[in-house]
Amino acid sequence: MDRSTAQPRAETIIDLLLARARGATADLPLFTALGSGGEHTDRVSAAELLDRVRAVAASLQEVGAAGDRVIVPTLPGLDFHAGFLGCLYAGMIAVPVPPLRTGARLRATVRNDRLDVIRRDCAPVAALVSTSEDAEVARRADADGDDGREPALAWIPVQQPTGPGTRSPVRVEYRPGATALLQYTSGSTGDPRGVIVSHGNLVANQRAMRDRCEIAPGTTVVSWLPFFHDMGLCTGIVLPLVSGAAAVTMEPAAFVRDPRVWLRAIEAEEDVFAAAPDFAYDLCVRRIPEAERAGIDLSTWRVAANGSEPVKASTLRHFAEAFRPSFFREEVFSPGYGLAESTLIVTMGRPLFPAPVRHYDRGALAEGKAVPAPPSAEAVELVGCGTAVAEASVCVVDPGTRRPLAERVVGEIWVDAPGNCAGYWGNTTASGEVFGVRTEGGVPGTEGSYVRTGDLGFLEDGELFITGRIKDVLIIGGENYFPQDLEAVAGEAHAAFAHQRAAAWPLAEERDGVAVVIETAERDQEVLASAVRAAGIAVARAVPIPVSVFAVARNKVPRTTSGKIRRRACAQQVASGQLRLLSQWSSR
């Protein structure tokens, strides 16, 4: 079967939902929600979902008009699905944000720093909650915290009456070029920005994902990823609608508490696509005892996408080895690369083909050249993140001259694709710096209109390898060093730091050296002293300047809502004394 042409050629998410709700599979399960123990808490067919969506849309149209923004927190069960699609059905612009509390605890989270920044940026007219009771609590809490800087929000419950006699929304013309949502970036290197994502961006990008991964109506997407993050939203909601697949979702907390819930959900389906960041696969290895792994059957897992953060070869190896008794195959891994500004996916490995893992000379990489090297302490191990998906092209460019670079030369990654978005909401200056840029030099094949990613990498035989972010690069003696490389070196230096997060950054002046903060569960002071010394010596061998290493408790390194390390924030917390240090070592 030609999977790429099996589905109707609808151009918006709402067109796809309408077609699904009126088709032969209208009454079959489309989305299923799982509870913390893996039990079914809600299940909805396309026809039932459409009823819920229309009810939400009707309520929204009473308080706003097409083009108005609506805050959509990550709501429990399938409430987010109905709320998000309800915004689009009403012709409004959805603004996904992290979850608010529910019930009595809702009051404390109606006002928070990130949400306040987003409200000031996009001026929403409404926000969604699950129930009428939640709406009343939110209204009171919002009024109590009102400082007069933003307009009052209408708090709309998603759980609306449906069926005969309920009011119907006004019909809206759904255009591919219309804005569907504002996807706020994670803020790993600055304040969050609202990426303007159109209906056409969403459909085109997830069609490319569907075709690369051969996702069909018989496939089930199994996801715990948060819906306010682009990978969770696109794979958990948009991809099933684009491909005709079904989806099983659970809250991120359920996965973190017990990763077996995710794997058991995969085991229960016949043909599975499941995506997660690198840390999730590592967490499965650490949290699921060896004795239990053989009791989990992962033979139906056909595509295990790995993205959203740097992909580590060690993670792929350890997971494949740990779950070999579960019939997991290493070639199921499909590393990928993407970003919100291009509506998620840009490159991805081919399913059931081993991901390339290659070694490069560390010193040459510092000079911007990817020179193959044998495995050793002087080599950097990198995982290929696949080739460009359909209709997308990747160009590696000198960020200063904007000239395309040859293969195996490190530069900024630029993307030309149908998923490229229109810009940042209300920020023409930043939009002009990132969107619609063009290369210099007239190199054939690079004439397109690109998005600048701010990420560094190189191409080899069409395969994309990521080396870091421009804003995070450590420039030492005129050469570039990548913080995640130094973080990995520190983490591998002692068992106390194994599988822990770290952050590396340059101190105030180059001559002052480089600092590395690394998390640990260890509390024995003698062991910690030995561990930070071992990490410091290992990092000092990699860089020709002084090194300082600080150990902190687990979950203390600042991260974005999507899990990316906030290195600048970490540096500020160390400098101000906010971060409690368990042990430290310096080469000075």
Image (cartoon, grey):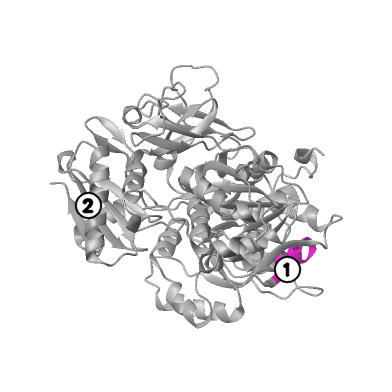
Measured along the vertical axis of the image, is residue 86 above or below residue 447? below
* Residue 398 picture location, percent across and down: 39, 26
Mark 2: secondary structure: helix
Mark 2 / mark 1, whichever is N-terminal: 1
| Residue that appears at 54% across and 30% down | 463
Residue 428 showing in the rendered view: yes
Mark 1: secondary structure: strand
Measured along the vertical axis of the image, is residue 96 above or below residue 420? below
The residue under label 2 is 533
Name the residue type under label 2. Answer: Arg
Nearest the eye: 279 or 17: 279
Task: Please identify the dominant SS of the magenta region.
Answer: helix
Nearest the eye: 4 or 479: 479
The residue under label 1 is 43
Report if residue 543 lies within the magenta region: no
> Horizontal placement of 448 versus 456: left or right?
right
> Horizontal placement of 124 versus 32: left or right?
left
